Amino acid sequence: MLNRIKNILTHPGMSAVNLYARADRAGLYRHYARRCRAAGIDRLYLVVSLDCDLTRDTDCAAAVCERLRGLGVTPVMAVTGELLEQGAAVYRAIHAAGSEFMNHGHRMHTYWDEPSGAYRSCFFYDALTPEQVREDIRRGHETVRAVIGQPPCGFRAPHFGTFQTRAQLRALHRILKELDYAYSSSTMPYFGLTKGAAFRAPGGLIEFPVSGMWSRPLSVLDTWSCFEAPGRALESADYLREGRAVARHFAEAGLPGILNYYADPSHIADREEFFETIAEWTRVAEPADYARLLEVVTL
Ligand SMILES: [Zn+2]
C-alpha cells in the first residue's frame, strides 16, 4: 500500500488520467490510439506473456503454452533465473516451439509461506539497493543465455507495479542499456494510456506498458486478482468480462494498439474463462511477440 501511495505521488498525472478515464474513456483510448499510430502501430496486436515464478508454474507451463498455440498465440516467457535452472528441460522445449524469453531477474520472488498457508511475494526491487538490482538483472541475463542458449534482449521487472517511479525506471533502463537490451515491458497501464502502447524511454529503450481492465483502465488485468488471490474482490468471470469489453471497444472503434497481457500458468491452467478470453482477443488482434513488435515500431 505504501508503495502504491508513493507511486501516485511520483506520477501526479495519474489522478488526472483516472478522472479522464471515468469522464471520457473513449476519448482516453483515442488519445492512446494516436500515440500508437505515431509510433508506427497501425493495427491491433496481442502479446500474451507467461510469468513463471514457482515450480507449480513450471509443472503446467508446457500444457498452457500448447493450449495457447492452439489458439494461434505463442506466449512470451518471463521466468526467474532460479526457476529456469530447475526446469531447464521444460523451458528449452517451450523455446524450441517458438517462444521468446525475457529476462525476469534471477532470484525467486514468490514463496510458499507455511505459517499462513499462502503464497507470498518477496524480493521487491524497490527494497533493494541499486547494486543488488543490477546484480539480479545481470544474473538473470546470464541464466537465460546459459539455459536457453540465446541472450535475452527484453526485461520484465519482478513485481514491476512497485517499481514505477521516474527514478526507478530511469535506473532500470540504464542497467538494461548496459546489457544492450532493446526493450522492457515493466510499466503499468498508466504509461500506455498517456504515452502509447510502445514508447521510447529516456536513455533510448522501448517500453511496452502492460494493458489494463476495461472498468478500471489504470489497473492491470492479471490472473492473480481474478483467479487466485485469497479473499479476492474479482472472479474468473470478471476476467472474461473485462477482457471481452476491451476487445469489443478496440474492434468497434477501429483502434490500433497492443493488448499486452500477462498470466501466471498455475493460476489459469484449467480455467476455461482464461482461454475463452484469449480466443476473444485473437478475434480482434493479431498475435505477436515483442521481437515482432520491435520490427513494427518506428520510434
Ligand atoms: Zn514474476
Image (cartoon, helix red, strand yellow):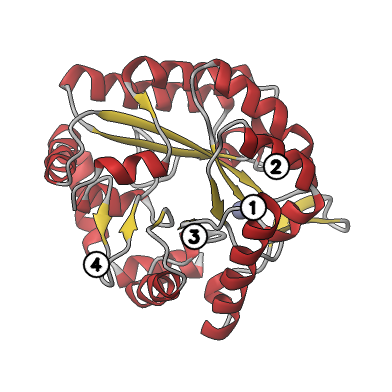
Residue found 75% across the figure and 39% down from its top: 90
> Which residue is under mark 2?
92
Q: Residue 51, relative to residue 174: is it above or below? A: above
Distance (Cα) linking label 2 and label 3: 25 Å
Between label 2 and label 4, give the one nearer the viewer: 2
Between label 2 and label 1, give the one nearer the viewer: 1
Between label 1 and label 3, give the one nearer the viewer: 1
Answer left or right for 199 relative to 116: left
- Crowding at dot 2, Cα within 10 Å, few <14 / some 14-19 / many 20+, comes out as some
> Which residue is under mark 3?
160
Distance (Cα) linking label 3 and label 4: 19 Å
Q: Amino acid at mark 4?
A: Pro
* 168 vs 208, nearest the viewer: 208
Between label 1 and label 4, give the one nearer the viewer: 1
Residue 25 position by quadrant: top left
Q: What percent of the width, then of the height, locates residue 186?
A: 43, 57
Contact (Cβ within 8 Å) of mark 2 with mark 1 = yes
Q: Amino acid at mark 3?
A: Phe
* 47 vs 240, nearest the viewer: 47
- Crowding at dot 1, Cα within 10 Å, few <14 / some 14-19 / many 20+, comes out as few
Q: Secondary structure at mark 2?
A: helix
Query: Which of pointers 2 and 4 lies earlier in the amino acid sequence?
Result: 4
> Which residue is under mark 4?
12
* 231 vs 131, nearest the viewer: 131
Query: Which of pointers 3 and 4 lies earlier in the amino acid sequence?
Result: 4
Query: Which of pointers 2 and 3 lies earlier in the amino acid sequence?
Result: 2
Answer left or right for 37 relative to 62: left
